[in-house]
Image: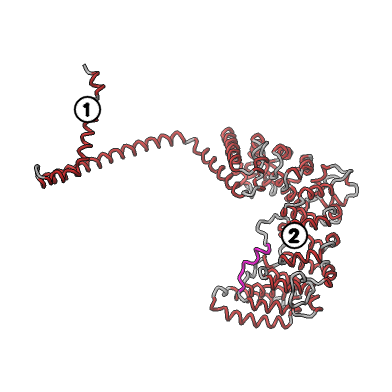
Amino acid sequence: MDRSGSHVAETALKSLAMHLQDEHAHSIIEETLKSICKVIVANPVDVMCNCYGSHVLRSLLCLCRGAPLDSSDFHRAKPSQILAERLNLDASQSNRNNLSYHHPVFSELSKFLISGILACSRKDLRTLQTDQYSSLVLQTALRLLVGNDPELLQIISILLGSNKDNVVEGNFIPMTVVHDVLNLMKETAYSHLMEVILEVAPQSLYDEMFTKVFRNSLFDLSSHHCANFVVQALVSHARDQDQMALIWEELGGKFRELLEMGRSGVVAALIAASQRLHTHERKCCEALAAAVSSTNVSPRCIVPGILFLESYFSCEDKSNWNWPKGIKIQIIGSLILQAVFRFPSEFIQPYVTSITSMEADHVLEAAKDAAGARVIEAYLSSKVSAKQKHRVVLKLKGHFGELSVHPSGSFTVERCFTASSLSLRETIASELSAVRNELSKTKQGPHLIRKLDIDGFTARPDQWRLKQSAKQLTYKEFYSTFGSNDTKSSRKDSFLADSSKQTSNSQGIKNMRKEIDNCLDSTALLSGKSGLKRRSEKEEHRSEKYAKHVMADDISKGKNKKKNKKNQVASEYAGPSSKGAEIAAKPFLSTDKTVKKRNRSNRPSKASKKLKP
């Protein structure tokens, strides 16, 4: 628990972890850890509630379970990472199925330590529930026990206020503690602990918590500045469409109130859950659009209003609200719109109308903002028609060079190029060619120059156009053969409207696009040398053919000589009148017949005889 001594203790634990690979050292390590655990269990509350001691204790728990001591999977993640997981944006999200990859080395020891920590009085338990440092220790312990449902059920039941030794399915949570749990969720430390409980809880316990604790209390919890994060976790881990339907009953009509209170995370979690469970998708889009626009507000304000949620909803007269100057776009608004543009195009037409109606200056300003650029990229990757995408791309015309040297704008330029027609592509390449030297000095510049073939456009514009046309034709042929129905329908107007991310085989299609690009690039490079290459190939083929003929003649001559020698030996050995001569000559009759056939082929034909005088 000392500021300096804690570093020594943690280094000692790391040094022990280095010897776990040696099975012969396990008994010594276990004996050492057992001595440490006995000391901690004797007075767990002081260690857990200490800012230095709690960190060492988390490392000790990881060591006992055989988990990496520095792995972020078993400690509290960053808020941005948690938000990305809840909005389905993190492909490598660490859900409860991915946490149980470690193999407990000292399972009995970890069980002894955790049970000793929780074997305290009710007063001490309340301290552990509400203290920020002890809450972190309990969160780590819960994540380490994923995959061990009996222990999880026992520990979670204790943390929810049930001290029963034998928990029974369907009665994990007595009704007498429900009110207390609802109040505890409004405490900062316990709200974080409850988020992890919802993340790792087995199916049976989650269902009981949903029914007994959360049902008919969702809006009240969502209105609280701490408890709303628990509701986000509950929605993000909803198991089926029936649970989503119950959540929608309580929160579906409260989008405007939640946004006005600043609880946009709950709205974002609802949108992501509807996508994940494929239910209430159209209703989510309609509810969000209705919350932002109203009878007095034009639908054109939907996208700008979501980008600046705080500024927009703090304005009393929303009909006179204007795009704010000098204010960064909010990350949560950007994430909500990114999720919206992953819905089918028929659900998001109000958002399409809004973004295509934005002023060119506002689109440019959004493209220069990291959060706004992601929204534009998501729109250009959506399933809307190419014509609607071109309307946004055209608003950036004349500014592609400026955007390409911007840290966040280079990705937007690349996405605009992919979604554009051939004429728009040429415009983008022309603007980037003008700033080529400056672009090459930026971080993403070399990639952008290579990807868009700016050097090729500058040196040989006609050949560059032909190559782009060939790519477009090849893509069309590929998708017409292998693309899914959704992909085909989304590419009616222009094939290059990239929606491959929404298909089930997105990674395979993306790799195929790269392969097609590489193939076409190599073909273009070799086209200028094709004449010379063909001549050299013909000369080489002729020389190889001549050498093969010479070799074949030599081999046939050698074989004939050997066969003639064998005939002579056989005739001399058997004599001309003996039966042995006939027997010895039989194997060589085929050779005589071939000779006769050759002689016949050399004779003039009957037709040629008639022509002679």
Residues at badges 2 and 1 in contact (C-beta under 8 Å)?
Answer: no
Where is residue 292 drawn, in percent x and y?
Answer: 84, 48
> Is residue 494 in view from this perspective?
yes
The kind of secondary structure element at disc 1 is loop
Pointer 1 local density, CA inside 10 Å: few below 14, some 14–19, many at least 20: few
For the residue pair 585 and 269, the one nearer the viewer reads as 585
* Figure label count: 2
Name the mark on residue 603.
1
For the residue pair 204 and 335, the one nearer the viewer reads as 204
Where is residue 219 drawn, in percent x and y?
Answer: 85, 59
Pointer 2 local density, CA inside 10 Å: few below 14, some 14–19, many at least 20: many
Q: Amino acid at mark 2?
A: Ala
User: According to the image, label 2 marks what residue?
Assistant: 238
What span is colored magenta in the figure? 95-104
Q: For residue 30, which quarter of the picture?
A: bottom right
Q: Is residue 61 left or right of residue 248?
A: left
* Residue positioned 74% across, 76% down in the render: 166
For the residue pair 437 and 273, the one nearer the viewer reads as 273
Q: For residue 367, which quarter of the picture?
A: top right
Is 523 contained in the magenta span? no
Q: Amino acid at mark 1?
A: Arg
Name the mark on residue 431.
none
Q: CA distance from mark 2 to mark 1?
A: 93 Å
Q: Is residue 452 left or right of residue 282?
A: left
* Residue positioned 64% across, 46% down in the render: 500
